Image (cartoon, rainbow, N blue to C red):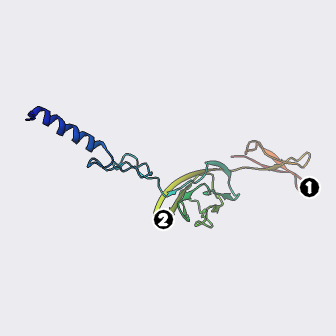
Amino acid sequence: MIKKATLFTIVISLMLVLGCSDNGTGPENTNDGDNDNGDGDNPPAASATADAGSDSDEIVGFEVIADGSGSSGSSSVSYSWTISSQPANSNASLSDANTASPSFIPDLPGEYELQLEVTSDGESDTDEVVFSAIAKRLFVDANNGTDGDIDGYMQDSPFKNNYKGTVYLRSK
């Protein structure tokens, strides 16, 4: 007769061998290549990624073109831009807000924050970009008639004109 301890050892050994093999009844292999091991720690990559471009300094009165071309998706990407904040009393508005590269003209100095939402395969993502608009003043040197500026601002400088006299601008 086989002793109970020997029989118990054989049964446990068989269970370990069968449980650790691919044909055993152990946990199912969930490695399907998407980095999701079934525990929620590594979710699959998003199908839509928004990239609104880099923040930049701009000039009041000149067209600004945003760049969302770095956005991606698993299929076609749709774009939706909005101005989420702008200086008080600004009337700036976006043109072509449903494209990768909308434009606007800042009408007042200050920060213009644009938000981009991209959608692809029912998934969406958002990103923001800030354009800081300054009032750049150009002047004409009365002595030699050349245009110029001093870091976007000017001191009391005369404009050369066609009249018999000189026009002075005063900075505030």
Rendered view: 94 above or below 6: below
| Nearer to the camera, 41 or 138 | 41
Residue 4 drawn at (x, y percent): 9, 34
| Nearer to the camera, 112 or 24 | 24
Give the structural element (helix, strand or loop) at label 1.
loop
Residue 148 drawn at (x, y percent): 82, 47
Disc 1 marks a residue whose amino acid type is Lys
The residue drawn where x is 13% and y is 36% is: 7
The residue drawn where x is 47% and y is 60% is: 124
- Local packing at callout 1 (Cα closer than 10 Å; few below 14, some 14-19, many 20+) is few
* Left or right of 42, for residue 49: right
- Pointers 1 and 2 in contact (C-beta within 8 Å): no
| Numbered mark located on residue 164 in the image | 1
| Numbered mark located on residue 74 in the image | none
Which residue is labeled 2 in the image? 121
* Left or right of 92, for residue 118: left
Numbered disc in front, either 1 or 2: 2
Rendered view: 101 above or below 111: below
| Nearer to the camera, 76 or 31 | 31
Residue 22 drawn at (x, y percent): 33, 47
Earlier residue among tags 1 and 2: 2
Give the structural element (helix, strand or loop) at label 2.
loop
Residue 80 drawn at (x, y percent): 54, 64
Disc 2 marks a residue whose amino acid type is Asp
* Left or right of 68, for residue 2: left
The residue drawn where x is 63% and y is 66% is: 95
Position of the N terminus, as image quadrant, is top left
